[in-house]
Amino acid sequence: MSKKAAKAEVGAVGKAAWLAIMRSMMLARLAEERLVRLYHQGKIFGGVYTGIGQEAIGAATTAACGEHDLFTPCIRNMTVHLGRGECVLNVFRQYLGRATGPTRGRDGNVHYGNMKNGVYAMISHLGAMLPVLVGGVMARRRRGMDTVGIAYIGDGATSTGDFHEAVNFAAVNDVPVIFLIENNKYAYSTPNSDQFRCKRLADRAAGYGIEGVCADGNDAVGLHLLTRELVAGLRAKPRAMLMECDTLRMRGHGEHDDASYVPRELVEEYAKRDPIRAAWERLMKEGVVPREALDQLERACREEVDRAYHQALNEPPPDPATLLDGVYADA
Amino acid sequence: MPEITYLEGIRLGLQRLMRERPEVVLYGEDVGAFGGAFKVTLGLQEEFGKDRVFDTPISESAILGSAVGMATQGLRPVVELQFVDFGMTAVHHLLNNAATTHYRTGIPVPMTVRAPCGGGFGGGPFHSEELESLFCLMPGLKVVYPAFPSDARGLIYSSVMDPNPVVFLENKYLYRHVKEIVPQSFEPVPLGAARVCRAGRDAVVLTYGAMVHEALRAAEQLASDGGYEVMVVDLRTLKPYDADTVLTAVAATNRVLIAHEGWRTNGFGAELSALVADRAFHLLDAPVRRVAAPDVPVPFAPELENAYRPNADKIATALLELMEY
């Protein structure tokens, strides 16, 4: 695409859509920075796992989808939740284990979802949500909805049996799912070189008889334009596909991990390509979103995060008397 | 009234469900036109179409995982594991996905996993396993195990209509060995209700699956040889199990034998034994006894499998010892 055509396309998406993407990214960044601080202050029970540096992927891709689409976010996808309409208040309720939170204190940190937004709550086992999403998309389509799904996973989860089974199952049944691999170079401490031998993970698509594409995971603008095109293609002709997004995790696996195994030069390289700053600059440069609107958005996000944290802090924890409630659904 | 086999009971239950409930879909390995490895689903694809009855790749994780996804989006998937043994490559979807979803998120998961199990036909270590106690360990799952054609028909119906994930265990030996004359129409059999399938006052055998029939034979033998009247209780549902019926039977007989086809240590009999010790210790005239498989992999050769697998003779011997205590 020529620069001029790309610019025209960015303009066509419209200011409101770009601001929504920026909002998801900024809210997630600010909420996660707050969670990091709380963790190190000893104010969070359990771990904190962030997607700092990877915000573009969830924000740009969810914004390219429709009302009935389905998503299985993974560890570093707060922007999938926020992009689909989750409120930051629920994020803090979840981390603080509040009775009012999405899992009512029954599960913690990143294990939450909201089916009103088409978002499944992940379990810890990486790769395990992939077949769940495939089944969910099949079911919604059988019920007459034009659903497309996006399954988010990391480079490490591509080594699981669930990845293979789910991708093949979706391929065989022509289920419109994008298996979106966020290649952030490290699965916990294990580098790509100890994880797989193919040059690029998207290359594996050929083995499943499906299409595979690579994208810059730190470029929210480019990623959003690409995903709009892919989603439209999958709706027109239902089929599975792989999408590999290049990115880097800018914190440890969790806040307990100093990530000293990641070379400093690599971190510095990706620091220069911060997804929020990159999108901000491009949208301003192309004249789609004025600086004042972005400044205003950032202030609003800061206030929202502050308000959400303090509200969640003052909400009640679960009552131990409810321990046994809800193991089974009532007939 | 037609005479049906255990296998036909399951098929008739599924057929009625699919006629009444458009949200029921059925899939697994070779279950479509081929009708499944044991032909339980034969004819269902022809009647309901490939949209609702379809084959999958050999992918137990994809089968169980996708069923969780479907069940949370308004369908009632019924999936077949070709053998329960094969489900072990994907059991994390039951333990971690299906069983925890409602507790964590409040979303019901009405899925049913059909799993043929048990031995007695030379299936060897990987086609004969009895893994009910493994499933019974998992909070959030229900576990059903019919012994008769009528129960197979009525219990599969209730399992599929239940809003929770249900593991529906089918005994392969019973598929064609057990027949029953049944009315054409049927009432669903409720989950969680045991059935006294032989009355008696001298001892009770608590059992399920194929061993129900072996226990009935043993009870007949004791009645004709020794004049003992042995009660037989078929649990039918293992989780949640019917503690009331069990305790009433213990109170009526005071001697308890537990019989199951699977392994002894940590087998389901250990749970029943603990229940009786906990709630009915004062009613016992003798220690609770168990007849179960020894803790070895299921052997292949008939001589070894016969030595391994509990049967009517082993149950009868144990019952006599129990009576003579």
Image (cartoon, coloured by chain):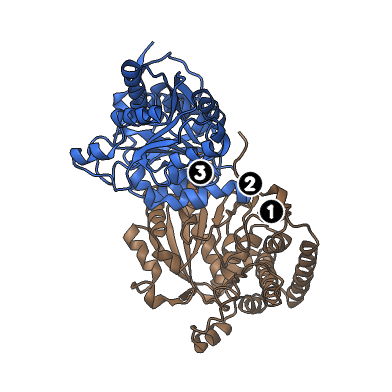
Q: Secondary structure at mark 2?
A: loop
Q: Secondary structure at mark 3?
A: helix
Observer-side mark, 1 or 3, equals: 1
Could you tell me the amino acid type at mark 3? Met
Chain the render paints brown:
A
Judge whether residue A331 can be spotted in this image. yes
Mark 2 residue type: Gly
Compare marks 3 and 2 and give the one earlier in the sequence: 3
Quadrant of the rendering where the N terminus of chain B is positioned: top left
Q: Which residue is mark 2?
A: B106
Q: Which mark is residue A104?
A: 1
Q: Amino acid at mark 1?
A: Arg
Q: Nearer the viewer, residue B9 or A276?
A: B9
Residue A86 x, y percent position in the rendering: 68, 58
Q: Residue furthest front?
A: B325
Q: Are marks 2 and 1 on the same chain?
A: no
In this rendering, the answer to whether B296 lies above or below A90 is: above
Real-space CA distance between mark 2 and mark 1, rounded to the nearest whole angstrom = 9 Å
For chain B, the rendered hue is blue
Q: CA distance from mark 1 to mark 3?
A: 24 Å
